Image: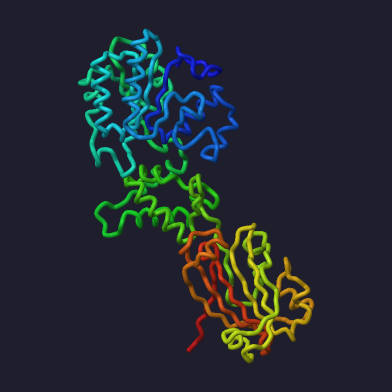
Amino acid sequence: MNVKPEEPTWEGRDRFILSKGHACLALYSTLALKNYFPEEWLWTFVQPKSHLQKHPDMNKTPGVDFSTGSLGQGASIAAGIALAGKMDNSNYRVFALMGDGELQEGQVWEAALFTSQHNLDNLMYIIDYNGLQLDGMINNILNLEPLKDKFISFGFDVKSIDGHNLEELKKALDFSLGNKKPKAVIYKTVKGKSNKKINELERDILKVVKHSFIPYYLQIMENLKTKIKNGKLKPGEFLPSEEELANTFNVSRTTTRKAIDELVIEGLVIKNRGKKSTIAPKKIMQPLNRVIAFSETVKNAGFDPNTKALQIVKEQASKEIAKYLDLHIGHDVVKIQRLRMANDIPLSLITSYIIPELVPGIIEHGLINDSLYQTLKKIYHINLTKAVQEISARISLDYEADMFDIRKGMPLLVLDQVTYADDRLIEYVNVISRADRYKYVTNLSSYPT
């Protein structure tokens, strides 16, 4: 293209219209490489006051010739600009890149009629023909074929090429300098072609069974879960996007989105704002067959434990606390409430109640980073020997979702435990943990009968 990056509004420049405005990241990267703006701008994508938003904005981004986003309109915009060039006796060319799904819009074909009627040989339509749109495969929703013949019948010179072949791409642009007809180049592309994970999924033939009683989203979820369990999708790696998975499994994005949501609920995938979802770290396992401190559990899992102290106070026992500690209602207890974290990720809200006569001075101690159980052992010479535990599950409340940085309604594990030193009752503790990052494990043995 004939352009001057140092003079983005130069009247003699060739024009480029990105009709499929949602693909603007590719355009922004190209403009940065052509020095329309500093590459550092790319890191501000969709941030407040950024020049680079989710769809191209000609008033904010140097090098953008027209603001786009509403699919189907780019063809008409490009035709109007091309006609203006003809009327001004200018030599610039106009290129409009469109997705295949938007060719189902009647406005595109109205623009094609207009283009042919006015013999706009300075215009080229570029079609990204990957066969997939938002809700599924093009051919299943509204078939475009025979696409090449359609454009020919509208008076266009047409080429159909491999969109992944750079030499063919270059020749296609040179094709725009040909005869006195408008041009259309159909780029045959494959979504996710260069994505290693997508290719691995396709090699493993992970497809949905079309006539199964099992919903598509559950089939996809189970396929991806198998990949995660056997290590082919590793913790911290990006999961292919909804669109890439839709192409791989030949389903709609709505279906793959639901599959990903189910994996999030199970704690196998983490959704990231503005980025692809990632495979979640392995869950931290809390053994139930022995009394063990949270910090020791986290360290054994390979994480760094840390703590945020919320409350260390003396209060009167409620009816529930008194029952657990075998006290009279209103008896003094020490309440210790802390948010426990692994690698700074909130995992558990732990609220302990201890009889103050057993731990004099513990409020002054603070317990900011220290293990409560280690403190009981080292300072008060209390060795915990057994515990009685009750485990339940429920969904998170608003304040818990905020505290754990999870969505409201995500599942939580609740542990109620009474802890003993020999037969002496020491502590009642309530532990609320994220079910997506934490699990309880016990070993059972059979006994001869």
Q: Tell me if residue 373 comes above or below residue 231 in the rendering.
A: below
The image quadrant that residue 367 belongs to is bottom right
Colour convention of the picture? rainbow
Indicate the position of residue 46 as horizontal and vertical percent values: 51, 39
Q: Is residue 202 visible?
A: yes
Quarter of the N terminus within the rendering:
top left
Residue at 31% x, 13% y is: 121
Q: Look at 48% across and 62% down and name the residue there.
A: 408
Residue that extends furthest to the top in the rendered view of this protein: 89
Quadrant for residue 43, please give it. Answer: top right
Count of labels in the image: 0
Name the residue at 37% across, 31% down: 189
Residue 114 figure quarter: top left
Could one spot residue 203 in this view of the protein? no
**Position of 258 relative to 191 (above/below):** below
- Picture coordinates of residue 436, whole percent (x, y): 51, 62
Above-or-below relation of 226 to 61: below
**330 or 435: nearer the viewer:** 330
Residue 337 placement, left or right of 192: right
The residue located at (42%, 38%) in the rendering is 192
With 177 as the anchor, is 295 left or right in this view?
right
Q: Is residue 214 above or below residue 395?
A: above
Q: Residue furthest bottom?
A: 328
Query: x and y percent of residue 274 in the render?
Result: 50, 45
Hey, which residue is sitting farthest left in the picture?
A: 153
Residue 106: x and y in percent read 24, 31
Q: Is residue 294 left or right of residue 239?
A: right
